Image: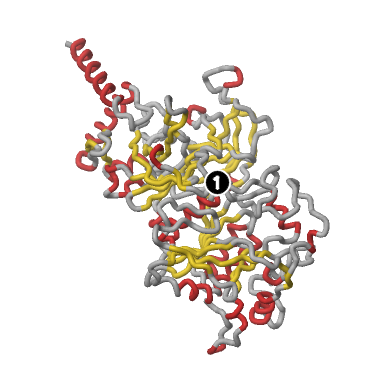
Amino acid sequence: MSNKMDSEQRRKRKQQQQYLAGRNQILNLPSSKSLFLSFFLFIFLIFLSLNRFSLIYFFNNRSFTFHPSLTPSTLSLLYSSKSNSILDPQTTTTTLHPFTLQHRILFPDYLLLFLTGHRPKPNEVECVYYNNGSATGSTEPTGDIIEVQPVLSTDQYDEFRSIARCPFPKNMSTATTVDIRRRGEMGRRDLNQIAKKTQSWDKVAYEATLDGDTVVVFVKGLNLRPHKISDPITFWCHFGLKGFNKEGAFMLTTKSVSVAQEVVRCLLPHSIRKNPGMARGIRVTVSHMAGNVRHPVRMLVPSVAKVSNPSESVKRKSGGKYELCVCTMVWNQASALREWIMYHAWLGVERWFIYDNNSEDDIERVINDLDVQGYNVSRQAWPWIKTQEAGFSHCALRAREECKWVGFFDVDEFFYFRNEFRNSLAQGGGVPGENSLRLMVANFSSSSSIAEIRTACHSFGPSGLMLPPKQGVTIGYTCRLQSPERHKSIVRPDLLGISLLNVVHHFELREGLKSIDMPEGNVVINHYKYQVWENFKAKFFRRVATYVVDWQKDQNKGSKDRAPGLGTEAIEPPNWRLQFCEVWDTGLKDFLVSYFADSATGLMPWESS
């Protein structure tokens, strides 16, 4: 009897495997053993919870792919980062370690670790380097600690996870496994609890956010054409509760509807499309076709991305959306933020989104201080290098919930309203030009065709200075090139194309909409681009834009992004302080000194006393 039942079970399992094998949209199918164990575990959970959980199976009418439909209560158990779910392969209920390592990303200068839970303080944790045994050909990790170093920094990445940056060990090799622990903690870590695979920063799905009945996934390494919309037909999104490429991993698969540069937009699975909030916290990645025409291969991109919902962090003012917000991406620009934010807040900017691209200065404290002072500033940790365009796309989605218009410009760029600033004192004792920028965009808020406002940039040089100006760039730099270079844009985030394609200076708009160029006689942007060499040389070591070549590489030397005549090394050219000076322009400086300098001390509002 027992043999007959075993034979019957084997027959059923074989049929089930054959059925699932025919569904080509589900990758990395589970083994029969793991499938049986997973099924038994689901039955056990259902038995315990009775009516709390349900599992509904149905067919996708378009692709006939077999999908499980997960109820909200089921999802909350499976992906909860706080409960150490037994179904989450990166967490364990038996470990005593307070930080569980989920992912390890190899960057050019350090290792980025993704951890469960809230951000630890840098002085509370340390980086631990183990010998994983691969150097001797062993299949089992040894767990021997070979080095311990302080963390470089920590940050809160999202509501689920924090990140820590670890330096390279002195003898970095493929046999080295990196983990994190509390300072002073002793003993060896069970390496089987540590994610072995180290991903590369330049090929990974790194972020994902909900947008209606779609999810927008941000991906490095697709190598698509810059500044162009790509054909989405060969791209798919995959949603899972476990890590991808693992035995027993189960994925829901949907088609992409738009692909451009590093941004892939896919439909949500049918099982959660009517309730998109159910997708929050689920892991997601992207696959694409590779190889030749005769033998195409579907490639699954490694992923650290979890689906987030931008509407859950909305800071909307009473009465509706903010008229004007600003988004920017910075690296080590703490010293420039106060002048830039305080000045543009006077021009009418109501909300600020600062994407911090691995700053090592005091930027977090500066942003917190400005926010406490009422400037409504938030900081987004954005560790992904060479992703400015994708970061702006991410910010456009986030800001759309709060803002009618969003400006995308840098912390060395300042709007200057020539005519407004030349007027006499406004009635009531106000300063001429106050709220000029907000009033400018508000004039187009009711337009049915204008979705982008462009303003020309005038590039200023060092203006004879050898040291950074103490009173700020608007006061110190007063000599510029005669002709404008490029432009920057303020856009309606609700009217952008679904691709979210941008080239930093402007976005792809929905069909039928257009941009408008503001007359230079009314407004320009003073771009304090070529500053004193002490500040300018930082551009050699970090270019945040995806398709702008780092200046240390011997490529595109004639690009407008580069300063004319510079080579590939950060060596100060002769007479740098006198270059890029064709027209002396003190208009903005004269205005600010006249109306904003303290009458007793001469200090500007953004200066420290």
Residue at position x 43%, y 45% from top?
Answer: 259
Residue farthest along the right direction in this orientation: 574
| Above or below for 61 versus 565 | above
Q: Could you say which quadrant of the image residue 575 lies in?
A: bottom right
Q: Which residue is mark 1?
A: 384
In front of the other: 192 or 525: 525
- Left/right of residue 517 with respect to residue 21 in the rendered view: right
- Left/right of residue 375 with respect to residue 537 in the rendered view: left
Residue at position x 27%, y 21% from top?
Answer: 18
Spot occupied by residue 121 in the image (x, y as percentages of width and height): 56, 48
| Above or below for 541 versus 509 | above
| Above or below for 479 versus 430 | above
In front of the other: 262 or 279: 262
Looking at the rendered image, the quarter that the N terminus falls into is top left
Spot occupied by residue 219 in the image (x, y as percentages of width and height): 48, 42
Residue at position x 38%, y 39% from top?
Answer: 233
Q: Could you say which quadrant of the image residue 128 lies in?
A: top right
Q: Is residue 184 visible?
A: no
Kindly state the secondary structure of the residue where label 1 is placed.
Answer: loop
Spot occupied by residue 518 in the image (x, y as percentages of width and height): 54, 70
Which amino acid does the dot numbered 1 rest on? Trp
Q: Is residue 568 visible?
A: yes
Residue at position x 72%, y 61% from top?
Answer: 531
Spot occupied by residue 10 in the image (x, y as percentages of width and height): 25, 16
Q: How many marks?
A: 1
In front of the other: 396 or 338: 396
- Left/right of residue 125 with respect to residue 53 in the rendered view: right
